[in-house]
Image (spheres, grey):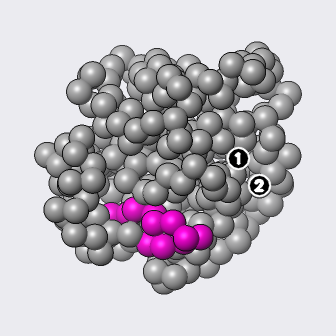
C-alpha cells in the first residue's frame, strides 16, 4: 500500500476531491501498477481503456462501494502507474499483467467491467479463467477483427500516418484532442480533462497511449481470435451499457456483441458518447448494481 502523502506529492495535479481513494501498488515486470480497492462485498473489477485510467470509473465506484468491493487498475503507462519509456506496451501484455494481478490477488466470483481497450484485455483473461468470472459488463468496446469494417479502413489511414508518433508524444494528442471529441451531449469540462492529460507528463511517458493506437493496426488477428474463442464465456450473464452517440465505436459493434452473447441485456444511453461511466455515471452505477442483484 502506498503512503497517501507520497502519492499526493508525486501527482500534485491529482484532484483528491474527485478521486478520494487510497492508492495501492502491485509490482509486475519491474514496474509499479497502481490500483484502488474500495468497499466490501462481491468483487467488481474495472478495466479501463485509452487514454484513460481508473479515474473514469470514480463516480460509479463512489456510488456502489457501500455494497461491493470495487477494484480498479491503471495499466502500466497510464494513470498513477509507472510509465517506463521502454516497455512492452502491447495489448496482449496488458492482458497478461491483468491475469497475473487477478491470480496473485486471488480474485474470485468477479463481476468484470470493461471499456474500450479494457474489453479485449479483460475478456481475454475471462476466456482463459471463466471459473473466476461471475458476470460481465461491457461498455463501448470490441473483441473481434475490424480490419474489413468501412469505418476502421478510413481510420487506419490516420493510424498509418508517420505523423502519429509525433502527435502522441509531443502534443499528447489522445487525451487532449481525441478524448473530448468522443463525448456525446455530456461534454467534459476543462478542469476534468486535466485529470486525463496530466498523467502523461512528457513525451517519454506517452508510449502507452501510442502503443494502443498502433495495436489497432497490428493486433486485429488477435482480436479475431478472441471472438473465435468466446464460447467459454458466451453463456455468462452479460450487461451491455452503450453510449449511442459514440463517434468511434458505433452501434453495429453493440449489435455484433449481442449476437455472440445470448444471455445478455442492454442499456442504451442515447445521449452518451464513448465514455458512459464519465458522462452518465449514475445510470451506469444503477445498471451494474441492478444487474448483479438479478443474478
Q: Is residue 269 above or below residue 44?
A: above
Image quadrant assignment for residue 74:
bottom left
Residue 209 x, y percent position in the rendering: 57, 39
Do the CB atoms of the residues marked 2 and 1 lie less than 8 Å apart?
A: yes
Inter-mark Cα distance, 2 to 1: 6 Å
Dot placed on the residue nearer the N-terminal end, 2 or 1: 1
Image quadrant assignment for residue 148:
top right
Q: Which mark is residue 143?
A: 1
Q: Is residue 33 magenta?
A: yes
Q: Is residue 46 magenta?
A: no
Predominant SS of the magenta segment: strand
* Left or right of 160 on screen, residue 11: left
The quadrant of the rendering that contains the N terminus is bottom left
The reply to whether residue 272 is visible in this rendering is yes
Q: Is residue 154 above or below residue 63?
A: above
* Left or right of 255 on screen, residue 180: left
Disc 2 secondary structure class = helix
* The one of 243 and 155 positioned closer to us in this rendering: 155
Q: Residue furthest left?
A: 17
* Magenta-colored span: 26-36
Residue 231 x, y percent position in the rendering: 76, 63
Residue 153 x, y percent position in the rendering: 80, 21
- Residue at 31% from the left image edge and 37% from the top image edge: 195
Residue 295 x, y percent position in the rendering: 44, 66
* The one of 158 and 280 positioned closer to us in this rendering: 158
- Residue at 40% from the left image edge and 38% from the top image edge: 201
Q: Which mark is residue 226?
A: 2
- Residue at 14% from the left image edge and 46% from the top image edge: 17
The reply to whether residue 243 is visible in this rendering is no
Amino acid at each position: 500500500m502506498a503512503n497517501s502523502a507520497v502519492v499526493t506529492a508525486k501527482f500534485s495535479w491529482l484532484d483528491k476531491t474527485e478521486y478520494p481513494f487510497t492508492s495501492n501498488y502491485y509490482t509486475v515486470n519491474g514496474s509499479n501498477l497502481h490500483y484502488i480497492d474500495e468497499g466490501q462485498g462481491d468483487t467488481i473489477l474495472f478495466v479501463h481503456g485509452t487514454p484513460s485510467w481508473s479515474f473514469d470509473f470514480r463516480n460509479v465506484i463512489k456510488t456502489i462501494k457501500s455494497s461491493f468491493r470495487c477494484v480498479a487498475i491503471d495499466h502500466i503507462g497510464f494513470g498513477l502507474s509507472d510509465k517506463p519509456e521502454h516497455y512492452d506496451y502491447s495489448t496482449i501484455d496488458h492482458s497478461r499483467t491483468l491475469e497475473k494481478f487477478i491470480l496473485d490477488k486471488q480474485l474470485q466470483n468477479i463481476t468484470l467491467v470493461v471499456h474500450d481497450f479494457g474489453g479485449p484485455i479483460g475478456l481475454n483473461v475471462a476466456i482463459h479463467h471463466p471459473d473466476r468470472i461471475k458476470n460481465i459488463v461491457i461498455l463501448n468496446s470490441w473483441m473481434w477483427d475490424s480490419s474489413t469494417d468501412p469505418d476502421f479502413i478510413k481510420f487506419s489511414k490516420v493510424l498509418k500516418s508517420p505523423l502519429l508518433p509525433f502527435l502522441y508524444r509531443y502534443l499528447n494528442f489522445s487525451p487532449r484532442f481525441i478524448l473530448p471529441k468522443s463525448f456525446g451531449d455530456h461534454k467534459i469540462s476543462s478542469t476534468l480533462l486535466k485529470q486525463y492529460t496530466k498523467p502523461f507528463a512528457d513525451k517519454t511517458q506517452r508510449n502507452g497511449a501510442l502503443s494502443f493506437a498502433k495495436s489497432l493496426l497490428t493486433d486485429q488477428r488477435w482480436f479475431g481470435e478472441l471472438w473465435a474463442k468466446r464460447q467459454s464465456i458466451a453463456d455468462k450473464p452479460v450487461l451491455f451499457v452503450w453510449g449511442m452517440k459514440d463517434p468511434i465505436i458505433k452501434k453495429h459493434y453493440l449489435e455484433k456483441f449481442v449476437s455472440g452473447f445470448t444471455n445478455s441485456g442492454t442499456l442504451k444511453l442515447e445521449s452518451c458518447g464513448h465514455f458512459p461511466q464519465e458522462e452518465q455515471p449514475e445510470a451506469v452505477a444503477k445498471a451494474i448494481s441492478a444487474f448483479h442483484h438479478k443474478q
